[in-house]
Amino acid sequence: MADSDFPGSRLEAPLTNPVSVSWQSPSNIAFVKYWGKTGRQLPVNPSLSMTLSKAFTETRLTSLPRETEGTADLDFWFEGKQNSAFGERMKRFLQSITDIFPWLEQVSLKLETHNTFPHSAGIASSASSFSALALCLCSLDTELCGILLDETEFRIKASFIARLGSGSACRSLFPGLTVWGYTKSLTGSSDLFAVPVTEVHPLFKTLRDTILIVNSEEKAVSSSEGHSRMVNHPFAEARIRQAGKNTTDLLEAFKTGDKDSFIRIVENEALTLHALMMTSDNGFMLMYPETVRIISRIKELRRETGLDICFTLDAGPNVHLIYFEEQSEQVAKLIVEDIFKNIKQNTRIDDFCGSGPVKLS
Ligand code: PMV
């Protein structure tokens, strides 16, 4: 499939009335990390994530009549306020996809969006925001131009569009565990869109993610800057091989219910992501001393208690504590009585493996 496989439609007659659609779409946390891209936002390695449940964005997109055609025009509202910084990014994104949705030049758009989680909490808001927007665009395509797709085609198209906004967003379109990027270990996998992992042991459907907030300020280096540091990275080739193997091994662990391999791979990926940042040209560090203290303590606690806990990190200092529902009571106790002693800010967000986006109207 290429971009041209989504032939764009124009409105046959100018729009006379506003048309609105709205979607709720979750964020996701990667277990195998997407780090490095090429071409039109294609990944250099496969990645694998869990769709979250409680951390989501709700987006309402309204197309309004427009007098003259021109570049995509957007009025962006975030949490009830007009927001220019993120709005500019969304507008640039819309302007970049008029080959797929030519009608974007024939209408004005109003986008109203809010998140269920605090900004910069270590939850990828770009994943939930761009997946929600992509779903709204595909729904408007149906409403305005009569483009009809079955449920699977619709999700795949939305995943393709979300990818163009923010790579990791394409994985939020499906419930549970999702792979983006071609791997010979998963039939149907593609660099262009994500696909759901279907062979999953029931245990892995009960995964939980508690985000331990170390710092909620804007991070010093954006993920797009981070991706660009992978070009000519001295360890790039080895990294791409490692991500491929970790994806294959993790898919096998999901099938068989192998918790030990899961834990080993998830922590290896988290530390590799940050090692790649540190070893890039003009290297940088996003972990804080507290991040290091918490992840060391999680490893010790696993040894001491025998609980199946592990950590992952996004491109930031906050720690995602990953565990299984059957041990959630013991883990909650550990967080309060032990792990929180290592953090100044005792803030956490409890989330779990989710069931994917929901159409609101
Ligand atoms: O989708 P982006 O460009 O924000 O990149 C996300 C990269 C990581 O969050 C660090 C890893 C991942 O796969 O989600």
Image (cartoon, grey):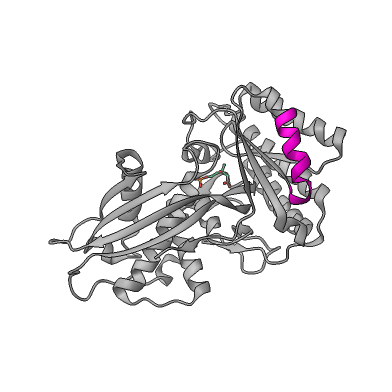
**Residue at image point 24% right, 72% down:** 11
The correct choice, above or below, for 87 with respect to 50 in the image is above
Q: In this figure, what is the number of numbered marks?
A: 0
Magenta: predominant secondary structure element?
Answer: helix
Nearer to the camera, 80 or 10: 80
Q: Which residues are magenta?
A: 324-338
Residue 209 in view (yes/no) = yes
**Magenta stretch: includes residue 329:** yes
**Residue at image point 38% right, 68% down:** 139
The image shows residue 60 at horizontal and vertical percentages of 36, 57
The image quadrant where one finds the C terminus is bottom left
Residue 166 in view (yes/no) = no
Relative placement, left or right, of 131 versus 206 is left
Quadrant in the rendering for residue 337: top right
**Residue at image point 33% right, 55% down:** 94
The image shows residue 220 at horizontal and vertical percentages of 48, 28
**Residue at image point 62% right, 58% down:** 179
Nearer to the camera, 72 or 191: 72
The correct choice, above or below, for 168 with respect to 232 in the image is below
**Magenta stretch: includes residue 300:** no
The correct choice, above or below, for 192 with respect to 223 in the image is below
The image shows residue 282 at horizontal and vertical percentages of 53, 26
Relative placement, left or right, of 58 versus 195 is left
Nearer to the camera, 361 or 8: 361
